[in-house]
């Protein structure tokens, strides 16, 4: 299939994947649901199925869509910002920053004042990590420098998260909490979590029109500026959007790695690097990717979502590193 | 009206305070040893590097020209193009029309002019150094600007393409554009209307090439001895 044909199918293809992912996610769990049963649940003709769908499956599915879209889009933005294929919220420590912020808010008991202090603290934590990476690695930095900055931040912020959890959480809850924040997951997600991450949709809308300018920026700061892009303004918007979207995803699902690395890379290989196409396709495809990983996690006896994305993403990352060298 | 006016521009450790005015329709070469500040001066002139003093394009202070309008008025070609992503040649050249609303005008002609038509669909990160340089020049050409700032555009080019770029630059100046480019090959200086010589971040000489490029100057700035001897002259057919 030629690139032009593939490009034509990019959007319809990713939407189809998303629809399939949503159906699989609604159907999978302790109680397996057929399409007919899902319909009965949605229309309210079967009360039990309706309860399962509305209270458990639908919030979980929507949170999966939100975090998948957010992490994949953040990956696209960070790759354009740093002009490096390997930049992504997980590897650069931005997700870990979000986790640390959220965990501090929970540990200090701020969550009791307002549930929305958790995502706010995640945003602060992620922003701190982003600023640290920007200072340490700068735009156009070598892969080594970028990854080393990410390794250092991930280790530091992971230690902060573990320390806070081990000191502020009751011991019987402790291990489960640490695992949740460090490995990410979608268990017991409620409508509150869906609402908490809802600003991700606004982020996606704001990101959509930046695609063309991101094309120019990804070939160089001076190049973009000389062609009429307000680079300072664009970079500020990109970094704020990517960080806030990652932070919100982390606040509701913990650290889910590799989505921002794998999804944009596959779509760039399939459909070309133009961001006007890559941004929407990654938003939709990222959501589909997390849905399928979560369905697999549930089918394989409640594996952690973060473990599944790492099992897919880890080898993929190593393959990319080998290819890059 | 002057195309470019630099007044007391200076960049710490790279460029000492200097004034420079370029008239409209001139092909001006910027020469000097490695590290003499050529790229810095071009970036300052192109409005890409903050500087002390003032920069004006066509009589207007740069600060008063919105960034998107600058993208229509001037084109900048970097010394080396780094392409991390596999955009097609055609799409990178088309980026030159960004500030014109991405209308795609002149892209096919620019590709043809730089022998890139056959490479139009090829990813830019799989091109040779010279091909990449031609892509950047083609992109500058489609901007259709009044001012061109080219940083060593000939460095990676073979002799035919280098001569073609010089001919193009001369043609551009005849249509009222001004071309300010750095170069190393002084044997090509006879194509220029004017030569500006930088040395250790300071303006050393400025004028027509035949006046400026004396044996004394080359000895003082580059540490080489000038000897004219009959030799090979390469020209486009």
Image (cartoon, rainbow, N blue to C red):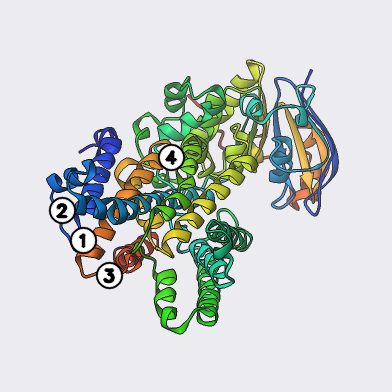
In the picture, the disc for residue A275 is: 4
* Distance Cα–Cα, label 4 vs label 1: 36 Å
Sequence-earlier tag: 3 or 2: 2
Residue contact between numbered discs 1 and 2, judged by CB atoms under 8 Å: yes
Of circles 4 and 1, which is in front? 1
Which chain letter matches label 3? Answer: A
x, y (%) of residue A136?
Answer: 61, 63
Of circles 3 and 2, which is in front? 2
x, y (%) of residue B141?
Answer: 54, 26
Sequence-earlier tag: 4 or 1: 1
Label 4 CA crowd tier, 10 Å (few <14, some 14–19, many 20+): many
Same chain letter for marks 3 and 2: yes
Q: Is residue A25 visible?
A: yes
Residue drawn at the location 43% of the way across and 65% of the way down: A255
Residue at mark 1: A29
**Would you identify the image quadrant in which residue B17 lies?**
top right
Horizontal arrangement in the rendering, residue B43 relative to residue A157 (left or right): right
């Amino acid at each position: 299939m030629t690139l032009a044909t593939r490009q034509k199918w990019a959007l319809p293809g990713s939407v189809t994947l998303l629809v399939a992912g949503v159906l699989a996610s609604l159907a999978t769990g302790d109680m397996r649901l057929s399409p007919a049963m899902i319909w009965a649940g949605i229309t309210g003709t079967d009360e039990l199925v309706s309860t399962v769908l509305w209270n458990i499956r639908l919030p979980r599915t929507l949170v999966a869509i939100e975090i998948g879209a957010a992490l994949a889009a953040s990956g696209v933005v960070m790759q354009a910002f740093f002009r490096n294929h390997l930049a992504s919220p997980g590897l650069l420590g931005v997700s870990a920053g979000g986790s640390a912020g959220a965990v501090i808010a929970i540990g200090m008991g701020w969550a009791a004042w307002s549930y929305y202090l958790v995502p706010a603290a995640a945003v602060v934590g992620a922003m701190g990590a982003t600023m640290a990476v920007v200072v340490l690695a700068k735009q156009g930095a070598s892969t080594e420098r970028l990854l080393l900055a990410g390794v250092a931040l991930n280790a530091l912020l992971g230690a902060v998260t573990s320390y806070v959890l081990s000191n502020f959480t009751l011991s019987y809850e402790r291990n489960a909490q640490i695992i949740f924040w460090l490995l990410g997951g979608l268990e017991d997600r409620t409508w509150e979590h869906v609402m908490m991450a809802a600003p991700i949709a606004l982020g996606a809308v704001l990101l959509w029109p930046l695609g063309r300018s991101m094309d120019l920026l990804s070939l160089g700061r001076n190049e973009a500026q000389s062609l009429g892009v307000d680079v300072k303004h664009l970079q500020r918007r990109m970094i704020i959007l990517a960080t806030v979207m990652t932070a919100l995803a982390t606040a509701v699902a913990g650290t889910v790695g590799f989505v921002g690395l794998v999804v944009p890379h596959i779509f760039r290989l399939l459909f070309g690097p133009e961001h006007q196409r890559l941004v929407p396709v990654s938003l939709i495809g990222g959501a589909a990717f997390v849905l399928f990983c979560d369905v697999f996690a549930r089918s394989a006896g409640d594996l952690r979502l973060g473990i599944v994305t790492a099992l897919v993403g880890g080898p993929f990352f190593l393959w990319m590193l080998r290819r890059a060298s | 009206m002057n195309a470019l006016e630099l007044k007391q521009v200076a960049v710490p450790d790279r460029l000492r305070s200097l004034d420079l005015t370029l008239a409209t329709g001139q092909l001006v070469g910027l020469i000097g040893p490695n590290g003499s500040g050529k790229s810095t001066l071009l970036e300052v002139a192109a409005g890409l590097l903050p500087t002390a003093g003032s920069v004006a394009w066509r009589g207007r202070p740069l600060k008063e020209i919105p960034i998107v309008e600058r993208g229509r008025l001037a084109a900048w070609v970097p010394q080396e193009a780094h392409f991390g992503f596999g955009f097609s040649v055609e799409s990178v050249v088309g980026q030159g029309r960004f500030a014109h609303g991405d209308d795609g005008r002149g892209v096919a002609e620019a590709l043809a002019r730089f022998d890139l038509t056959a490479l139009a669909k090829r990813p830019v990160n799989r091109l040779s150094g010279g091909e990449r340089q031609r892509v950047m020049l083609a992109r500058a050409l489609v901007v259709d600007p009044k001012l061109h700032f080219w940083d060593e555009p000939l460095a990676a080019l073979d002799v035919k393409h280098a001569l073609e770029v010089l001919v193009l630059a001369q043609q551009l100046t005849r249509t009222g554009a001004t071309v300010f480019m750095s170069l190393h090959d002084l044997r090509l200086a006879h194509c220029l209307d004017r030569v500006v010589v930088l040395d250790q971040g300071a303006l050393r000489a400025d004028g027509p090439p035949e006046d400026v490029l004396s044996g004394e100057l080359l000895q003082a700035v580059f540490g080489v001895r000038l000897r004219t001897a009959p030799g090979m002259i390469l020209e486009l057919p």
